[in-house]
Image: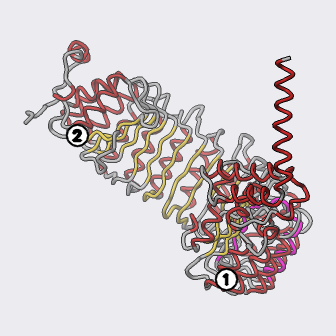
Amino acid sequence: MKSRVLSPCRDIDYYEAHEQDIRLEDITSDDINAEILRMLRYDDWNDLVNLINLSRERTNFGDSSRFAIRENDDCGWLGYFIGKSQKLEMMFFDYFLGRERIDALMVGLCCNQSIQRIQVDRDIGEAGFRGLGNFLGNNQSVKHMNFYSFDIGSECAQNIASMFGQCQYTSLKHIEICENNLHDEEFAQIAAALAVQPQIEELVLCDNIIGRLGCIALGSTLKSWRAPSLKKLYISIRDIDDECIQVMAAGMINCSSLSELNLSGRYLTGEVGLRSFADVFQSESCCMEKLCLSEMSIGFDGASALAAGFSRCSSLKSLNLSHNILGDAGLDAIVAGLANSSNLEELLLSSNGTFSSTGLGSLATLFRTAENLKELSLANNGINDEGLQALSAGMRNRCNVSKLNLSNNTITDVGLQALVSGLINNSKLENLQLSGHRSITVAGLRSLSAFFQSESCALKTIWLVDMSIGDDGASALADALVGNKSLKELRLSCNTSGITALGWSAFSKLLCDTSSVNNTYLSNHTLELIGRWNNGGTPPDIRRYLLWHRYLEMKQRFVTQVAMVKVIMSHPHLKMEPFFPWRLKFLPLVVACFDKVKFIFGRSETGQDLSIVYQFVRGMPLFVVRSYAGENAHRKRKRDEREA
């Protein structure tokens, strides 16, 4: 049994002097750890494995990147080999090593210049964070530092703050602190320490408990930065007030490169703080492209305050105001503010109370000005048939939306029919979400036929999840899709849609109508999914056709080849008599088709190729003999000419 390795803190000269003599088996606790050291020693990394994870145990024995530290592992040698590596790109800390071992590890680690990402998944103590600070000060390659899914208490937050406050780490661009149960007071310490890191370009602070103190500290830090580089700020907040928003807005104005802001959580007061955001958008240096203010209880007053800023923010491309309380009045204010936002590509307004025909009529006017709008989400807004009619009216003449989400409203057959009339000439829509409308019947589903059959239809995915489709609805959808060549995914709830074997048979016929060779050839060869992800719950015969479609598309085969495969698979006894007038001119074409099937599937599925050759020989024996004799005579004549 190996004796315990104490990992004394030696200097680099010691490791360099003894490297040639050291046996990896003597300084590691198992073969996997020894192999990791070998890869570090010789930089012999698999292209897919260029990370190392320091942990207590490995959950998967085959995990070749997880270095499970036990008492027989020498952390000094581990750090030395990490320091030497020129290919190691990522390092994860998932184990508290203790002061002695972390100090030994850091001696070598601080020499590394290849690591680009550090992820801390556990409190590594004062010595660990101090050592990481020294490493960041020496390393010029680390761009990302993540703290993920562990509790950051008061002492841990103080250690992290001390690490960030040591000096400016010029290469560090991205900091992420997520799911750490980080409280307000603790985050305030970290935010204040970031004052010496103005080079940060992306700051992600999600799923913690950050409130007033933390946000004020962060806002003050942003304002203190000279020549800041911040481009993206994502933060989840709780119970903040107007003063807090005002301080953060002042900091954001200072960050002239800020292009993405995601601020979500509980906001206690009204429009005063949000009005300060208008100053951010109205500043001459504003380059905001993506803005998310979800779950902020924004109503009419807040929307009006924001709209004043939107009117001068021509750079805005994405706006997410989901999970607020806009209502019709707030929606009208937002639309007015976006009147000049010609670059707007994404507008997400789900879960905002109730939008009636009044608010949706106002929204419809946006289609005329926001010509680049590609995604519109209006899910869960209590939209009824009258409201959808108002929205659809604006879609008829000019609408370039490629993704439209209307799920979980109160739409019936009448509303769906109105929607189809608005989309009938739309050549841009690729994704339509109508899930959750159990009031839509077979009559509404049948109305989709006009859209599916339209020459301009470009729809690739339609969502009809959590709807009572039934067998009649399935037949209506199957009939509507006859001849459609764009739709690839028909998403349904297989187990709750009410579709039985009768309804599934309609889809089977749509995909492969075996009543004749011609009907098989004209079947749908485009659909790749009917049901849930990976066609779960879809009957096997239908799943087989869908898999063929997906497989052949991956192989970049043409639709005609898909049709050919279905014909050959579905008609094992093809009759060749109709082609006899073509004599033997047609036979090579048929044989070539079978060769393509063999190439696609790697084998002959049915053996029809020999059967077809036999039919030609049997039907035209004299012609075959004459052709064979003539070919032989031709070859003999050529041979005689060469010999002469």
Q: Is residue 116 left or right of residue 324?
A: left
At horizontal 55% and vertical 80% (from top left) the residue drawn is 495
Residue 551 drawn above or below residue 636 = below
The kind of residue tagged 1 is Gly
User: Marks 2 and 1: CB-CB under 8 Å?
Assistant: no
Q: Which residue is mark 1?
A: 503
| Magenta segment includes 401 | no
Q: Quadrant of residue 285?
A: top right
Q: Is residue 304 visible?
A: no
At horizontal 85% and vertical 55% (from top left) the residue drawn is 371
Q: Where, quadrant-wise, is the N terminus in this rendering? A: top left
Residue 69 is tagged as 2
Magenta stretch, residue numbers: 415-435
At horizontal 34% and vertical 28% (from top left) the residue drawn is 39
x, y percentage for residue 438?
66, 85
The kind of residue tagged 2 is Ile
Dot 1 lies on which element? helix
x, y percentage for residue 641?
87, 22
Relative to the observer, which residue lies in front, 188 or 86? 86
